[in-house]
């Protein structure tokens, strides 16, 4: 919707430099916001194990958000 309503703002946001979502797991990738989804989909650090802070279950980093919605 943002691209349709204000293309120049959407393009500016897309150029913002960001780190990979899995930076804390060790990924050193840096790129533009618009490239982040493509990178993170195939990032090998997305498969690294992490432990849920609430329940202590070990899960794959890529599944943190899904687990957080169902965590007891």
Image: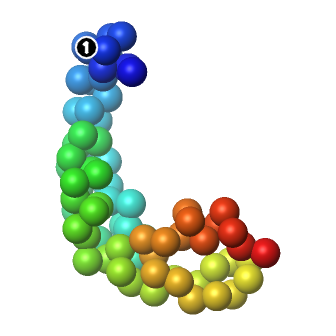
- The location of residue 19, given as percent across then percent down, is 32, 55
Scheme of colours in the image? rainbow
For the C terminus, the quadrant is: bottom right
Residue 67, picture quadrant: bottom right
Can residue 23 be seen here? The reply is yes
Can residue 26 be seen here? The reply is no
- The location of residue 43, given as percent across then percent down, is 25, 70
User: Residue at left 42%, top 71%?
Assistant: 62
Establish if 32 lies above or below 24. above
- The location of residue 4, given as percent across then percent down, is 31, 15
Label 1 Cα neighbours within 10 Å, binned few <14 / some 14-19 / many ≥20: few
- The location of residue 39, given as percent across then percent down, is 22, 59
Residue 53, picture quadrant: bottom right
User: Residue at left 36%, top 67%?
Assistant: 23
User: Residue at left 65%, top 67%?
Assistant: 68
Circle 1 is placed at which residue position?
8
Q: In the image, is 69 to the left or to the right of 72?
A: left
User: Residue at left 28%, top 62%?
Assistant: 41
Establish if 59 lies above or below 70. below
Establish if 35 lies above or below 52. above
Count how many numbered circles sit on residues in the image. Answer: 1
């Amino acid at each position: 919707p943002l691209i349709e309503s204000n293309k120049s703002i959407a393009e500016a946001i897309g150029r913002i430099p960001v780190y990979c979502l899995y930076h804390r797991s060790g990924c050193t990738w840096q790129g533009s916001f618009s490239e982040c989804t493509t990178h993170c989909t195939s990032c090998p650090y997305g498969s690294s194990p992490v432990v849920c802070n609430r329940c202590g279950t070990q899960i794959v980093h890529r599944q943190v958000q899904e687990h957080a919605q169902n965590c007891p």
